[in-house]
Image (cartoon, helix red, strand yellow):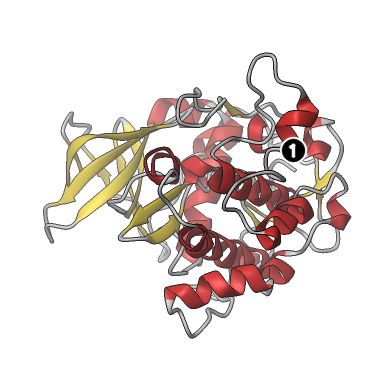
Amino acid sequence: MSILSQDQPQHQQQETADTAAAPTSSSHTNSSSVPPTSNNGQQRKIYPGLKNTVGPYRLLHNIGQGSFSEVKLAVDTRTGDHVAIKVMSRAMVQSSDRLGISVRRESDLLKSIQHPNIVGFREVVETSLQLCIVLDYAAGGELFEYVADKRAIASEQDIQCIFAQIVDAVDYLHQLNIVHRDLKLESKFTSHFHLKLTDFGLAKVIDMDSPLLTTRCGSEDYAAPEIILGQPYDGREADIWSLGVVLYALLVGFLPFNMRPGMSRKSFLSMIAHADAVSEESKDLVRWLLQAQGSDRPTARQLRDHPWVVAGRALLGAGATVTAGSRSGDVSAISATSDS
């Protein structure tokens, strides 16, 4: 079915009993589930739990919904800036070791990275009722909406510009040994054709000496075969598969593994091969990304240097490229102490 009318894929977080599962004691829950708001050892400031405000931010309306959170548009009353705030129930976070660790890891990761195609982190704010991650606001909406509204009139050059930005962000993460694990059309926000990667709740720093993961997570429509089969997987290879699904949808307007009723799998998968106004170079790139064996897929750096992606970057007039780095210079300090 066309992504213009399909239901958005349900966010799946089916998790196995990982060898590095988090402790379950109540004392651990209360101490580690709440992400710190200060790096200088000072006591966290807890604001009153009010309906329409979160600390210095005035809440406006919902702009997104997750499994355990709401994303709200807000105004920083100190500066007048619009921001996006991921709002989570404090009680829910404190009642779940795994959720608490995920929230802590997401905020720590976002504090530590900086890239023009990754949503900017501002701060963590706590109230008596809520835990909130405050992010820059990208006014253009979801890439899913862009595809739904504009794909019919978008040129392949438009798609090249969009995809090159996604690739640059993922390559940056992989150079820092960070895997995203939830790349999908709903994750990217555009503002004046400038793209921002978001949704870092499942992102993880991998151990290069033992890079294989076991947790089954992310959205099924974008999940690599090895994840679907419950096999240990390299998160970098799984991210590349997800990029293949995203590129397929951008080019054709369909998610590649979501068939219309009555359509054979063979005929559906052949749609990219017979797509009008789609270059052979882009078709070949999709095929490379969607290789069944993870080791046969390109690395993010190989993808970044692919001529079709390079051409997209040139169309943006980017010129200079971004070297992998971090705000803190210490991403390695975000250790993988929870799920795999």
Where, quadrant-wise, is the C terminus in this rendering?
Answer: top right
Q: Where is residue 98 shown, x and y percent of the image?
A: 61, 34
Q: Where is residue 245 shown, x and y percent of the image?
A: 65, 44
| Number of numbered discs overlaid on the protein picture | 1
Q: Depth check: give the residue in front, 106 or 247.
A: 247
| Residue type, numbered disc 1 | Ser
Q: For mark 1, what is the residue?
A: 270
Q: In the displayed structure, would residue 257 be above or below residue 135?
A: above
**In percent of the image, x 55 and y 34: which residue is there?**
99
**In percent of the image, x 52 and y 58: which residue is there?**
156
Label 1 crowding class (10 Å Cα cut-off): few <14, some 14-19, many 20+?
A: few
Q: Where is residue 215 shown, x and y percent of the image?
A: 74, 37
Q: In the displayed structure, would residue 282 be above or below residue 172?
A: above
Is residue 193 shown left or right of residue 226? left
Q: Is residue 10 visible?
A: yes
Q: Depth check: give the residue in front, 301 or 245.
A: 245
In which quarter of the view is residue 274 placed? top right
- Mark 1 secondary-structure assignment: loop
Q: Can residue 183 be seen in this view?
A: no
